[in-house]
Each structure stands twice: as structure tokens, then as C-alpha cells.
Image (spheres, rainbow, N blue to C red):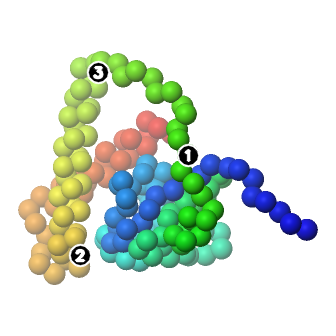
Amino acid sequence: MRFRKKPIEVEAVHYLGDGNMDGGVPPWLWHALSEGKAEATNGADPFVIHTLEGAHIASPGDWIIRGVKGELYPCKPDIFELTYEAVEDATPKPPRRALAPNEEAEVARLRKVATAAEAIHKYLAFDPVGCCGVPHGFWRDVNALRDAVDAWHRRKL
């Protein structure tokens, strides 16, 4: 017998290597990282995805796919190109509303956290094994980022 894949939509991100993703790390992958379903080693290869079948390595150039049940798996670029095509998002976007004062404060706080995350990323890219010592404020920035991600998850769950 012959079979054809059902037309389903998945989410995917192109892994560039050294912890970098084309277009940044999507929220679903951050969530998987926070739950231990995936792990990156201080922004360096390998990028490991934990599945029911065991650990799988995403190599630079691979795609990381989130399947229909939320499962993650790496896919080689040639297989991805033969199997998937981009889908236009047909969902209409609601108009943006003005932010309330408390929301403006939250946006300002999250911008500070994003700045801290960029500083952490730059430090790890420069000194991935910590041989040059930890710069002033590094752990403060790490804790601020962790607290912001935890708060975001509590609001979304």
C-alpha cells in the first residue's frame, strides 16, 4: 500500500548553530528549554532535543520542528525542503490598543530584561567556558531574565 502525508501545519525554526536561530528563539522553544525538553550548552553546539525516542542533536543548518502534539524534533534541511512549504498566516491580527500605565511599566521592565539577555548572550559568546571571570552584574542579569521568564509563564499558563 502507498500513503500520503496529511496536510498539517507545524511550527519550525532554522537552527544556525552556536545557539542561534534564524529570526530568534520562538516562545515554544523557550518553553521547551525551560522544561528540559531541549538544551543548549551555553550557546554552543550541540543543541540537544529530548524526545520519547531519546536525545537527538540539531546540527547547524537543521530545522527544529514543533509537531501537531507539541513534540520537538530536528530535521535535516534537504528533508525539510522536500516535505514542508511556508504557510501564510491567514489569521487577521487585531488592532493594537493603547497601553495602560501599568502595561507601559511592564513593557519598560521587559525591555530592561531583554537588554540583560543580550548582555548575557554577548558574554557567553565571548567567554563560553567562563575562563576570564564573570563580569560585574552578570548574575543579577541572569536572575532578572529568569524572573521575567517565570512571570511570563505564570501569566500564560
Marks 3, 1: nearer the viewer = 1
Give residue 125's position: percent from left, percent from top. 22, 70
Give residue 79's position: percent from left, percent from top. 59, 70
Q: Residue at x 41, y 77 (%)?
A: 46
Q: Residue at x 51, y 70 (%)?
A: 77
Label 3 with label 1: CB-CB less than 8 Å: no
Q: In the picture, residue 119 is in which quadrant? A: bottom left
Question: Which numbered disc, 2 or 3, marks the residue that appears first in the sequence?
Answer: 3
Numbered-mark total? 3
Near mark 2 (Cα within 10 A), the count class, few <14, some 14-19 or many ≥20, is some
Q: Where residue 87 is drawn, which disc sits there?
A: 1
* Residue hosting label 3: 99
Classify mark 1: helix, strand or loop. Answer: loop
Can residue 146 be seen here? The reply is yes
Q: Is residue 47 left or right of residue 86?
A: left
Give residue 155's position: percent from left, percent from top. 43, 36
Q: Amino acid at mark 1?
A: Val
Real-space Cα distance between discs 2 and 3? 39 Å
Classify mark 3: helix, strand or loop. Answer: loop
Real-space Cα distance between discs 1 and 2? 37 Å
Residue 59 position (above or below residue 70): below
Q: Residue at x 31, y 48 (%)?
A: 147
Can residue 49 be seen here? The reply is no
Near mark 3 (Cα within 10 A), the count class, few <14, some 14-19 or many ≥20, is few
Q: Amino acid at mark 3?
A: Leu
Q: Is residue 109 left or right of residue 67?
A: left
Question: Which numbered disc, 1 or 2, marks the residue that appears first in the sequence?
Answer: 1
Near mark 1 (Cα within 10 A), the count class, few <14, some 14-19 or many ≥20, is few
* Residue hosting label 2: 128
Give residue 144's position: percent from left, percent from top. 24, 49
Real-space Cα distance between discs 3 and 1? 31 Å
Classify mark 2: helix, strand or loop. Answer: loop
